[in-house]
Amino acid sequence: MSNTKYVFVTGGVTSSLGKGIIAASLAKLLQQRGFSVTIQKLDPYINIDPGTLNPYEHGECYVTDDGAETDLDLGHYERFLNIPTSQANNVTTGKIYQSVINKERKGEFLGKTVQVIPHITDEIKRRIQILGETGDYDIVITEIGGTVGDIESLPYVETVRQLLWEKGEENAIVIHLTLVPYLAAAGELKTKPTQHSVKMLMQSGVSPNILVCRTEHEISDDIKRKLALFCNVKKEDVIQSIDAETIYDVPNLMLAEGLDEVVLKKFKLSREKQPELKVWNDFLRKHKNPKSQVEVALIGKYIELQDSYKSITEAFIHAGSSNETKVKVRWVHSESLTVSNFEEKLKGVNGILVAPGFGDRGIDGKIKAVQYARENNIPFFGICLGMQMAVIEFSKNVIGLEDAFSTEMKSNCKHPVINLMESQEKVTEKGGTMRLGAWDCNLIKESKAFHAYQSENISERHRHRYEFNNTYIEQIESAGMKATGFNPKTGLVEVVEIPAHPWFVGVQYHPEYKSTVLKPHPLFVDFIKAALKYSKK
Ligand code: GLN
């Protein structure tokens, strides 16, 4: 039996209150006090994972080292905690039902009626405790997706009720995140929505131990007292979470409010050591006091929902801080870029990043953006599809291979410089079948990538089906684009560069997933450095 303590984070009143950031901030404070902590997200939807979701539905699909396609909150967990998450850190209703149904087919419940309680709840319980049972963590924080009262969250809340009862309040607690709205006409903060959402939670037999209240205005002691009285908590357990300038301020705000203190108190864990936040605060100071500014164009087709590129924009923040530079993002919709307007749309930027993506919507705009960066010596960073577009643009416009394309967009193109990986040829199912997760890559010395990483052997995360077609490698290299990173086992090209250009790097993998506050990603740091250099020209 492990002694792991469990914190459940539920949400009330409305979605988008930032449960993920509160969970990550609490985890950070506990981690910096010396506890080992991990965070898990339970998503009530029926998809097995978000890999098949359009980013417009749920924002970016985040990928872990072990190849799980997950909710973007896992990205926040890694960026805050600087420790990798895994398959076990994201559970969906789809996964729960799939396991239970598989067991039923094997006959594991022979003779019994399979029901939500106890079979589905037992499976949720098992998944929640997997991380705790590894013995690696003192505290596991489990964020329950959705809002209390949603039909699909019910089995999760019921599981939390059972676990609270089984483990006792010294080992398991609930933090309920709610909204305390400000009514301008009345000039008042209102507590009723919080009271109602706590009541809703209590109808499921769960009484929150701590309330975290999102608010746009300071919550007075009187309001805290009122909330405490109506919601069965102590006043010190009512924590204000006021709107912050940046999500990276939230750990400090929670520290000032004493969230970590009250959690440790309930768990009867030592509160002697204060959180060590020096490195974190150095990052924040540099982030908030930039000495210069660069503007970088982000070319993508999902830019109406900026969460679709969450890890990329966060990696810019980390790299900006490390260069003491503010990174301003110019969002450019790839579909809006045409032959006649691309110069006007991209004029004045100090760097161009062509984002990952799937399918042919907006492809011509992406190719145009690559061409503009290449011809004007503007630092260029291509990620996954962005790297593939760089290879296509180069093949068309430099080598003169008309009809060079990716077989993803044009299956019968004359020059398939990007084509389907052999391992993908027989794949017909869409879910979880891409080349996913961390793979090794060897970098060629004297390359930009090697210069950035300062290492020949790296490992990065992937999410793709198509690859650089090695039959074109000689032709492409003799024209001036070099392959500088390879998978050591398969020879798959992972990195391409143009050595004659100040900074032109395309990567088949997704560096953005591994950028954290503590370890800004070397390629992002180097790209911003190059953009800064360009801006001073
Ligand atoms: N659509 C491309 C592929 O499958 C690129 C994927 C991506 O950008 N993540 O290879």
Image: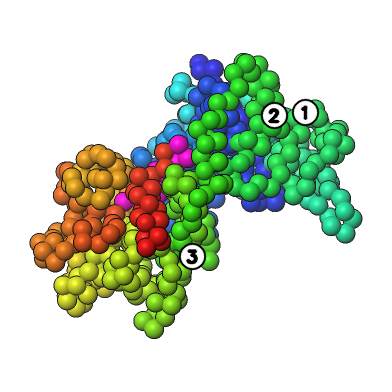
Determine crowd level at label 2: few under 14, some 14-19, many 20+ residues with C-alpha closer than 10 A: some
Quarter location, residue 21: top right
Q: Amino acid at mark 1?
A: Glu
Mark 1–mark 2 contact, CB under 8 Å? yes
Q: Up-down: is 54 above or below 342?
A: above
How much space separates mark 1 and mark 2, taking CA atoms? 8 Å
Query: What residue is pinned by disc 1?
Result: 236
**Disc 1 packing (10 Å; few <14; some 14–19; many ≥20):** some
Region in magenta: 508-518
Evaluate whether residue 77 shows in this view: no
Judging by the rendered image, the residue that carries numbered circle 2 is 258
Q: Callout 3: 10 Å neighbours few (<14), some, many (20+)?
A: some
Point out the residue furthest to the bottom here: 340
Residue 26, picture quadrant = top right
Q: Taking the image as drawn, is residue 268 in sight?
A: yes
| Label 3 SS | strand
- Where does residue 423 sit, x and y in percent of width and height? 21, 53
Q: What amino acid does circle 2 point to?
A: Gly
Relative image position of residue 421 (x, y in whole percent): 22, 57
Q: In the rendered image, which residue does mark 3 sit on?
A: 330
